[in-house]
Image: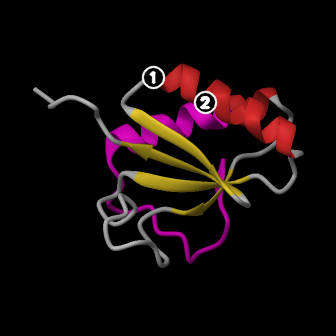
Amino acid sequence: MRLKDNSVKIQGISPELLFGLIVADKVYENHGRELVITSLNDGKHSKTSLHYSGNAGDLRTYYFTIDETIIVRNEIKERLGNDYDVIIEGDHIHLEFQPKRPMT
């Protein structure tokens, strides 16, 4: 796993997002690719984006076919469960921690 470049800021990400990234890294590794994180709590996103709270990241996919991207996305989602959203957004996978129930 690596950051795209030094524009990607890892400071302030949540432990839950870090866990999600570790899981995603294992899935990418199982498909013979290095996980490259293209954005965390940096860059420009919608005003309500979970990137700004440290709960979302974008994962490079250009080296996968669309079918492979769907498989990788599904494997990440299956491993992480309902508290994570894993969405294919054009040229990347958007991964976010967004619990569906109150945390206690």
- Magenta residues span 1-26
Q: Is residue 75 above or below residue 48?
A: above
CA distance separating discs 2 and 1 = 9 Å
Residue type beneath disc 1: Gly
**Residue 24 within the magenta-colored segment of the rendering:** yes
Specify whether 94 is left or right of 54: right
The residue at 29%/35% (across/down) is 99
Circle 1 SS class: loop
In this view, the residue farthest toward the left is: 104
Labels in figure, total: 2
Residue pointed to by mark 2: 76
| Foreground residue among 91 and 19 | 91
Q: Examine the image and state in which quarter residue 6 appears.
A: bottom right
The residue at 56%/77% (across/down) is 7
Quarter placement of the C terminus? top left
Residue pointed to by mark 1: 81
Q: Examine the image and state in which quarter residue 26 appears.
A: top right
Residue type beneath disc 2: Ile
| Foreground residue among 33 and 80 | 80
The residue at 32%/60% (across/down) is 12
Specify whether 98 is left or right of 58: left
Q: Is residue 62 above or below residue 42?
A: above
**Residue 65 within the magenta-colored segment of the rendering:** no
Q: Which mark is residue 36?
A: none
In terms of sequence position, does the residue under pointer 2 or pointer 1 come before the other?
2
The residue at 71%/59% (across/down) is 90
Specify whether 95 is left or right of 89: left
Circle 2 crowding by C-alpha within 10 Å: few under 14, some 14–19, many from 20: many
State the image coordinates of residue 91 (x, y, percent, origin top left).
Answer: 73, 60
Circle 2 SS class: helix
State the image coordinates of residue 88 (x, y, percent, origin top left).
Answer: 65, 48
Q: Examine the image and state in which quarter residue 2 appears.
A: bottom right
